[in-house]
Image: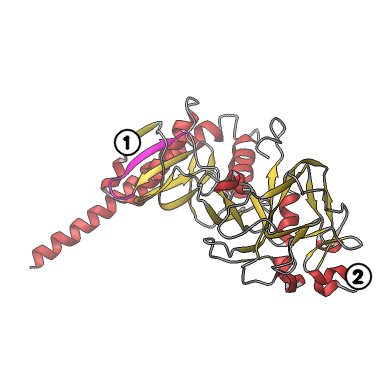
Amino acid sequence: NYFDIFLYLLQKIMRGVIVLIAYLIIAKICGTASTNNRGTNNRGRNNRGTNNRGTNNRGTNNRGTNNRSTNSRGTFNNVGYSTKYYHKIGYMYEQSPIATSVMSMAAYDMEIAAVQCLSTCQKEANLGTKSCIAVNFNTRNGTCQLLSKQPLYKYDTKVKSRALWTLYTEEPIKYPRDCEDIEQKDIIKYYKIQPDTSKPPFSVLCSKHDLYRTYIQYHDRLSSFDFQKGTWDQYQNGFKDDHTSGRKVYYWIGNENLHTLTHSRNYSVRFGCENSNVRSGCEKTKLKRIHYSGFLVDSKQNYYQLTIGSVIKNDDDMDDAIINGSRFLTHENHTEDACASQGGWWYKNCTNANFNTANENMFWGGMKCSISRIRVQLVKDDHMFLNV
């Protein structure tokens, strides 16, 4: 029994020694490369080794403590600079790899094998052939796939859930800027977007039926929320029905989010109204729409004042009913404009349209609406008005 215990302890000690030696070898290889190539070889002292590529630009500042991701893996030194990889546990990126191999250190320790995989990626990138910027690492057998591409935004359809894999990327995977950046095409669903990276992401409604334009508003006359009685705070922060099935969806993006969105990129806007005067029984009626060339919402200090472009396309009965320069008011602001008692909308000496009034009273010009929706479309130089 004592002999068995001795053998067991000896095996544990030997395993620890092997892991330590392996770790020191990798560290020495990386450190030697760093010293020889970037340190004293007239590149470390000319502000490219220690200053620009070392702790300043790529190390502590940009990749290290810059709060670019909360799920970052550790750093390692390689060829003169430290790199921080961002990882997504339980996922892999389905791309044709530059190379695939099993890490030798996997026989001893998977953590070290992961570092070895990342080191291999960096060495491949420094060869100048095909740049490696991401890896898929298998946490069971140590398989390392070197990738020349990485997902840019969340909801990328090539990022698959895989229990034994971890995806490492050089850059954090960002939230999409709007619905048009999203590749997953569910029929209608809420997604988080982040038009301005200095502000937190927020939820928006996206729909496959509308070419994945970003919804600002959706109001069905059968919805349970009373748009007319919505408060200033509710319209500022936004509100929604989490159930996106059926015909009772209600949604407002939030004025603060709308301000952020419209100041991040150039957008046109479409207002849609289903005419309740011609809707009867189960008859399917086409949504009437009007498309404006520009759409910009100012800050809270200016009452989310509206700047809108010219009409570029409209259906019958959808005449220009938006007053440029209108300010957003709710029923609480009725002393500034008596018409504000109709509900949260843009007013300037009253209004010619209101999609956010009582469920039965939505209107655009002389037309009443049973369903209303507002969505923005990214202005693109070459084909900005296609599919309007």
Please give left or right for residue 42 compared with residue 326 in the image.
Answer: left
Name the residue tied to disc 1: 101
Residue 199's spot in the image, x, y percent?
68, 57
> Mark 1 touching mark 2, by CB under 8 A?
no
Please give left or right for residue 19 compared with residue 158 in the image.
Answer: left
Give the number of callouts. 2
Q: Residue furthest top?
A: 129
Q: Can residue 221 be seen here?
A: yes
Residue 136's spot in the image, x, y percent?
40, 43
Determine whether 194 is above or below 82 in the image. below
Q: Can residue 23 be seen here?
A: no
Q: Which residue is depicted at the point 86% across and 68% down?
A: 339
- Circle 2 packing at 10 Å, graded few (<14), some (14-19), many (20+), is few
Q: Secondary structure at mark 2?
A: loop
Indicate yes or no whether the magenta region holds residue 140: yes
Q: Quadrant of residue 56?
A: top right
Name the residue tied to disc 2: 336
Residue situated in front as seen by the camera: 251 or 160: 251
Which kind of residue does numbered mark 1 sit on?
A: Ser
Magenta part of the chain: 139-148
Q: On the rendered image, what quadrant is the N terminus found in?
A: bottom left
- Label 1, label 2: how many angstroms apart (C-alpha)? 70 Å
Which kind of residue does numbered mark 2 sit on?
A: Glu
Indicate yes or no whether the magenta region holds residue 316: no
Determine whether 119 is above or below 256 in the image. above
